[in-house]
Image (spheres, rainbow, N blue to C red):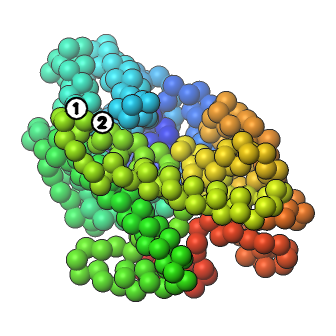
Amino acid sequence: MNISIVGLGYVGTVSAACFACKGHRVWGVDINEEKVRIINDSRSPIVEYGLELKVAQARAKGLLQATSDAMEALKHTEICFVAVATPSRPNGQIDPANLFRACEEIAKALVRLDLQQTVVIRSSVLPSVLQGCDEIFSNLAPGRVALCANPEFLREGTAIRDFEAPPFTLLGVDDPDAEETLRSLYADWKAPLFVLPTREALLVKYASNAFHALKVVFGNEIGALCRNMGIDGNAVMSVFCKDTNLNVSPRYLMPGFAFGGSCLPKDVRALLYSAKQLDLELPTLVSLFESNNAVIDRAFRQICATGIKRLGLIGLSFKSNTDDLRESPFVDLAERLLGKGYELRIYDPNVSVARLTGANRDYINRVIPHLSCLLVQSLDELGDCELLLVGHRYQGVDQFVSGVGVDVIELSNQSPRARIMEEVASD
C-alpha cells in the first residue's frame, strides 16, 4: 500500500521503517527539517535498537521517503497515519495543539489535491481529543476523511520487536470501508486483530498504560517492604510472577526504579484529569505518582545517609537502550543531588550520542544543559568517584563496578540472577 506517516518521533519513525520493510511505499512527514534530512540520509533521528538498520534497508529499497511537505506525501497515498506528540499540560490535560495542527494541514492538503484519505490516529489521545480531530476534518475537508484509530503498544528499547510481533493489533473504526482498508494492511500479521469503535479502542491504550504504571509501583512497594525486612524482594517477586493463569505478566513487576518516559506519566495524568472533570474519584490512580515519587525520595535519602559527596551516576535516560530523557526519574534524582551541592558525573552512552547527532539534541541543550555538561564519555572517568549510582547496566558496567572498589547503590535493585530470570520470563 501507499502510506503517509505524519510525525517522525519514536512511533512515527518505527512505523515508517517497519511498514516500508514489509514492502509498503511510505512517506514520512515532519516539520523538523533535521529529522527529514537524517532519514533521507538513511539514518535514524532517534536512538532505538535496530532502527537505523531498518531505515537504511527501507531507503535502499526505495520504499521510504521523508519530507516536510504534507501535500507532497498525501498525493501519493491512500492511508495517512498521524503520530505527532501529544504532551501533557501542567494540569495533566493532553495538549492537542500538535495533533490539531497536523489534522488542519492534512485537511487543507486533501482539499487542494481533491483527494479522499483514510486518516489513522496513532498518537495516544482520549475520545474528546479525537472528536476535536473529527470536527477539524468535518469543517475543513467535509466528506474526504474516514477517521480511525490504531493505538500503538511500542516500548522504547524494544519498539521494532513490539511492532513486528505485537500481542494484538487494535483498530478503532466506525466506517466499514476504512475497516476493510486497515484489515488489508494488517492481513499478513500473525497477531490477533481486534476491531472496536474508536472511543473504546482509544481507552484500551490508556487502560494498558495505567495498568503498567500500577505494576511498576506495586513491584517497587513490595521491594521496599522486603528490603526493610531483610528479604530478597527479587526472589519474592520472581516466584510471584510465575502465576500467569490470572493474566499476571512478569513485565514491570520486578522491583526497580521509578517509572517515567513519554507514555505512562502522560496517560495516567490524562485519565486523572478526565476523572476530575467528571467528579469521579480514582484513589488508586491518584496514588501512583505519590508512590512513584517515593521511590526517588528513598534513593535520595539513601544517598544522603552515606555522607559521600562525589558521585557517579550510570544512566540518565528513563530506560536503558534509549536516549529519551522525558520525565526520566534519573534526571529528577540528578537535579535533587545537584540542588544539595553534590559533585556529580554522569555516564550514559545513548544520551551522549543524542547530544551530538540525535533529534533529542535540542531538548538536552534547552532543558537540561546543566546536566549535559556533566556527561562523561567513558566509565573510566567515574573512577575517582566515591559512590556509584547504577541505574542502567550498559556493556562493561558489571566489570567496572566490580573492579573499581567503591561503594555502589543499585538504583534498579536488580541482581544479575534476577535479571536473567526476568529475561527468560519475558522471552
Q: CA distance from mark 2 to mark 1?
A: 6 Å
Q: Residues within 10 Å of mark 2 (few under 14, many from 20)?
A: some
Q: How far from the left and from the top, in percent, is residue 299?
A: 62, 61
Of residues 118 and 408, the one drawn nearer to the viewer in this rendering:
408
- Residue 189, given in percent of the width and then of the height, sits at 29, 62
Q: Determine which of the numbered discs, if any, sits on residue 273 in the image.
A: 2
Foreground residue, 298 or 190? Answer: 298
Q: Nearer the viewer, residue 83 or 21?
A: 83
Please, what is the three-letter code of the amino acid marked with disc 1? Answer: Gln
Residue at mark 1: 277
Q: Above or below — where is 220 with respect to 103?
A: below
Left or right placement of residue 247 versus residue 390 in this view: left
- With 22 as the anchor, is 184 left or right in this view? left
Q: Would you say residue 99 is visible in this rendering? A: no
- The answer, for residue 135, to whether it is visible in the render is yes
Residue at 22% x, 17% y is 141
Circle 2: residue type: Tyr
The answer to whether mark 2 and mark 1 are in CB contact below 8 A is yes
Which residue appears at 58% of the width and 34% of the height? 35
